[in-house]
Image: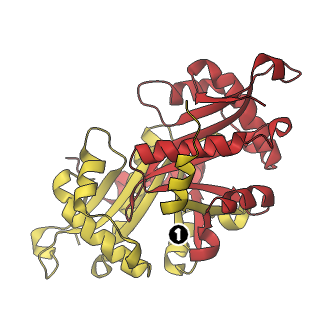
Chain colours: A yellow, B red
Amino acid sequence: MKYTIRHAGPQDCREIMRLIVELSVYEKLEEQVNITHKELEVDGFGENPFFKCLVAEVPEDERTKEGHTVVGYSMYYFVYSPWKGRSVCMEDLYVMPDFRGQGIGKALMCGIAKIGWDNKCTRLQFVVLDWNKPSIDFYKSHGAQNVTEKEGWQEMRIDDNAMEKLAQMAPKI
Amino acid sequence: MNFTIRHAKSCDCEHIMRLIMELAVYENMSEQVKITSKELERDGFSNHSFFKCLVAEVPEEHQTKEGHTIVGYCLYFYTYSTWEGRVIYMEDLYVMPKFRGNGIGKAMMCRIAQIGRQSECARLQFNVLNWNKPSIEFYKSHGALDLTEKEGWHAMRFEVAAMEKLAQMTVATCATTTT
């Protein structure tokens, strides 16, 4: 099956949102999705982008029965390691089930790696759910290390009321 | 003890690097530090910065015996959640041992939360080593959730060699067009 990997544009935001929701259902966390394509447009394609995105597209004759040609995406952004310097973070990687097994996921991930490499990044980092064996095996087969297991890193989050409470205690600068 | 929290400047990079090394030693990972103050200057204080940083400073009369007044730092950047939108990510939070217990760490974390709120961020995220009980308790006491425990998220990483291999496979495995 032919496909192309390209940079996403603002016109792709509805399609990316459709795929974000599909991924959250797969991850059994769909109740956590609180943004829409409008936030993606502002935050990814405005003056001060918070992320970039690659999409995988198939030709018209391979489109889904609903008529979609965008069948996968990978969102990424640049981060920083005070030990290693520039890094690229792959926030999401998703390919619609009917289009798996064609190398699309690998192509998206390689695209991110190349972008990172071209920008002098020394790491590609991401998170994965511990029960997601197919994905973990896929990543490990390409040399990924699980740094939660290997080094003991725990992912932490402060949000909603707890974040607001901290913000109100901040000193003046 | 009086202290101020301020935005770091390019001239602070040697001090930030000193504290980065101290934190790496505390985390038993000092051999992993490969950058110097030069990379910090290039990557944090030029047109396209990869991070921002707060520093904690004490007055001259409280300086360390080596003469340092910068006693803590907090390096952060913005990330994105496809579920919640904008996120502020606290990459490092460190206060020199002799200056702990004065609210400096908490003040820097609160300032990050405030900066995040001002930038319409829905989350403050970070990671912490699972043996670092004092830090975990500090964060949990301020409402932090451990997502590795709670939801099973694991941090994964491709280091340099594996990443280069993937990067070289890009041209070989797909037709790529840019818009």
Q: Position of residue B157 (x, y in %)?
A: 58, 57
Compared across the picture, whether A18 is left or right of A32 comes to: left
The residue located at (28%, 77%) in the rendering is A99
Q: Quadrant of the N terminus of chain B?
A: top right
Closer-to-camera residue (B99/B34): B99
Q: Quadrant of residue A36?
A: bottom left
Closer-to-camera residue (B20/B156): B20
Closer-to-camera residue (A16/A43): A43
Q: Up-down: is B97 above or below B144?
A: above
Callout 1 crowding tier (Cα within 10 Å): few <14, some 14–19, many ≥20: many
Q: Which residue is mark 1?
A: A128
Q: Up-down: is A60 above or below B8?
A: below
The residue located at (56%, 75%) in the rendering is B151
The residue located at (17%, 78%) in the rendering is A64
SS label for mark 1: strand
Disc 1 residue type (three-letter): Val
Residue A122 visible: no
Compared across the picture, whether B116 is left or right of A38 comes to: right
